[in-house]
Image (spheres, rainbow, N blue to C red):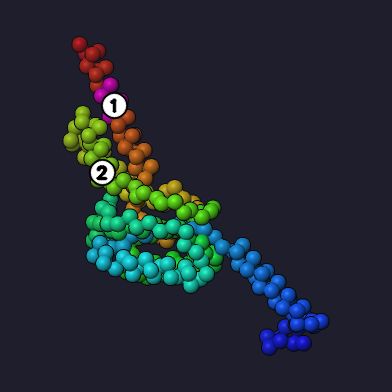
């Protein structure tokens, strides 16, 4: 027997055999779809002027995943947080973290959805090996780390501190893409998101060590001159 799509259907001995055949086909298709599923993590920033629409944005993003037969594993709203520097005239943005599972063929459409929403000013999509469900606390805010660095390095001259700070900004203002390669992250051509992470902390420690070394060298030189 030939189907409407031109494929030849097998002949069945009875109705039970036909039902079994259809069941196995559905099961096989389901298994194939499961193998195509991939785990991802996304962090996206919503402009401070659109914070009243956060729920709408989150629902829109989640609806896309569910429409594609995907699954949401984790959703953390980190709230309004200060940015390291201005993005589209915003000093603050509402951070959203989401882990989800979806077929790999839809991930570019997912990124396009984020790109076209003017309320989302930055986003970063990363591949994950497995589902992540535990709550994730937000990272320290940029100005908080700076304040702690200043308290720990009271001996640093104000002018020198400003120079070090500017150097740090120039080198690491875009920290989000430095730790990921093509296999670990799905990013756009421009940097996606501003997150203060271990890179920032390491730079802080480098500044401290550098200034301690200068202080020791200065002390040694003065001792020789005496």
Q: Describe the element under mark 1 as helix, strand or loop.
A: helix
Q: Position of residue 57 (x, y in %)?
A: 35, 68
CA gap between label 1 and label 2 equals 22 Å
**Residue position marked by numbered label 1 in the rendering:** 212
Exactly how many numbered labels are in the figure? 2
Q: Which residue: 24% across, 31% down?
A: 153
- Whether residue 98 sits left or right of residue 225 in the image: it is right
In this orientation, which residue lies closer to the viewer: 54 or 22?
22
Residue range of the region highlighted in magenta in the rendering: 211-217
User: Which of the image's four quarters has the C terminus?
Assistant: top left
Q: Which residue: 33% across, 34% down?
A: 205
Residue farthest along the front direction in this orientation = 16
- Residue 192 visible in this rendered orientation of the protein: no
- Name the quadrant containing residue 190: bottom left
Q: Is residue 20 magenta?
A: no
- Name the quadrant containing residue 191: bottom left
Q: Which residue: 42% across, 61% down?
A: 188
Q: Which mark is residue 144?
A: 2
Most common secondary structure along the magenta stretch: helix
Q: Describe the element under mark 2 as helix, strand or loop.
A: helix
Q: Which residue: 31% across, 37% down?
A: 204
Tag in front: 1 or 2: 2
């Amino acid at each position: 027997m030939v189907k409407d799509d031109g494929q030849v259907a097998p002949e069945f001995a009875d109705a039970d055999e036909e039902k079994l055949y259809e069941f196995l086909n559905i099961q096989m298709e389901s298994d194939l779809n499961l193998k195509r599923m991939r785990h991802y993590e996304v962090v996206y920033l919503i402009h401070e002027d659109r914070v009243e629409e956060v729920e709408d944005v989150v629902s829109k993003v989640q609806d896309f995943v569910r429409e594609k037969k995907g699954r949401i594993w984790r959703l953390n709203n980190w709230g309004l947080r200060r940015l390291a520097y201005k993005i589209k005239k915003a000093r603050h943005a509402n951070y959203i973290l989401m882990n989800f599972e979806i077929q790999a063929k839809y991930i570019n459409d997912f990124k396009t959805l984020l790109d076209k929403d003017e309320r989302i000013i930055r986003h970063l999509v990363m591949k994950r090996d497995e589902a992540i469900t535990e709550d994730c606390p937000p990272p320290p805010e940029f100005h908080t780390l700076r304040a702690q660095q200043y308290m720990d390095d009271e001996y640093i001259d104000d002018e020198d501190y400003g120079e070090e700070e500017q150097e740090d900004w120039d080198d690491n203002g875009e920290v989000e893409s430095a730790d990921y390669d093509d296999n670990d992250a799905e990013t756009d051509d421009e940097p996606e998101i501003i997150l203060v992470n271990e890179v920032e902390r390491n730079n802080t420690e480098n500044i401290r060590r550098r200034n301690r070394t200068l202080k020791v060298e200065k002390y040694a030189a003065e001792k020789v001159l005496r």
